[in-house]
Image (spheres, grey):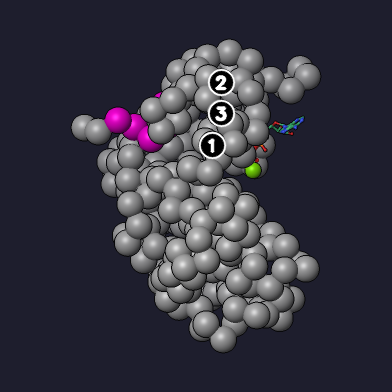
Amino acid sequence: MTEPAVRLRGVTKRYGTTEVLAGVDLDLAATRTTAIVGESGSGKSTLLQLVNGLVRPDGGSVEVLGSRVDAVDLLALRRRIGYAVQGASLFPHLDLQANVTLLARLVGWSADRIRRRFDHLLELMELDPGLAGRYPHELSGGQQQRASLCRAMMLEPPLLLLDEPFSAVDPITRAGIHAHFERLAATEPVSVVLVTHDLREAVTLATELVIVRNGRVAQAGPSDVVVAAPAEEWIERLFRSQLG
Ligand code: ADP
Ligand code: MG
């Protein structure tokens, strides 16, 4: 077993009197896709923000790609973490190409290397190169979402964090994006953490499943194992209502 991409030990976080994370222990496997599933408000986004250092834990330790987040240069770490959130959130005043390549230009990649990576990602996501000069409002929702994945993957990050990235698009477009995402995850040597409240999406895209409730990990393991043997009655009910 290789080193996990993410390791949380006894992680706690509170906002005011709300205990958002109540002692989370979690290993997320390298090069796999893990889905984190739970109701709204269960602490999923906070978990991801702890991983990329946007939020500090009150207690416990967060290790990402072999380093403790509190002992590492955060900017350097974030360059190794792709991050995409709900909705495409592309910069409206930049065209598709500028959106996708922005970070690579900031960190000083050569024009040639940027070009090659950009072309490769567009091909992988089946985005027509003719769209490169279009602004976000001139792209369809599905195209925006795919461009946003390209942007998150531009620097060849070993870790990709996705916070409900597909929940703003309609069901038909979402099915298409799922196929593109699977292609990306299969082609790139990347560990993916996908936060979603959609259990069906989780079992479609991820080989590992983490079920959270009230700031705790209720169950974690390979998706097929978890689905076959829910650890608690409410998880079984959740599966029956969403997957049945
Ligand atoms: P989820 O992504 O599962 O919906 P979040 O991690 O966003 O859950 O939020 C978990 C809880 O923490 C919620 O009760 C939310 O209101 C609270 N919370 C999240 N971020 C903040 C913040 N920056 N300040 C205060 N409360 C927050
Ligand atoms: Mg959230």
Callout 2, which amino acid?
Asp
Q: Secondary structure at mark 2?
A: helix
State the residue lying farthest toward the top. 59
Q: Residue 89 magenta-drawn?
A: no
Vertical comparison of 91 with 9: above or below: below
Please state the horizontal and vertical placement of residue 82, each as a whole percent of the image: 52, 49
Ligand 2 picture quarter = top right
> Which residue is tagged 1?
76
Of residue 142 and residue 20, the one placed in the foreground of this image is 142
Single out the mark in the foreground, 2 or 3.
3
State the image quarter where residue 46 is shown. top right
> Which residue is tagged 3?
73
Tell me which secondary structure the magenta stretch mostly adopts: loop
Image mark for residue 70: 2
Of residue 99 and residue 162, the one placed in the foreground of this image is 99
Please state the horizontal and vertical placement of residue 187, each as a whole percent of the image: 32, 61
Q: Are marks 1 and 3 in contact (CB under 8 Å)?
A: yes
State the residue lying farthest toward the bottom. 130
**Residue range (magenta):** 3-7
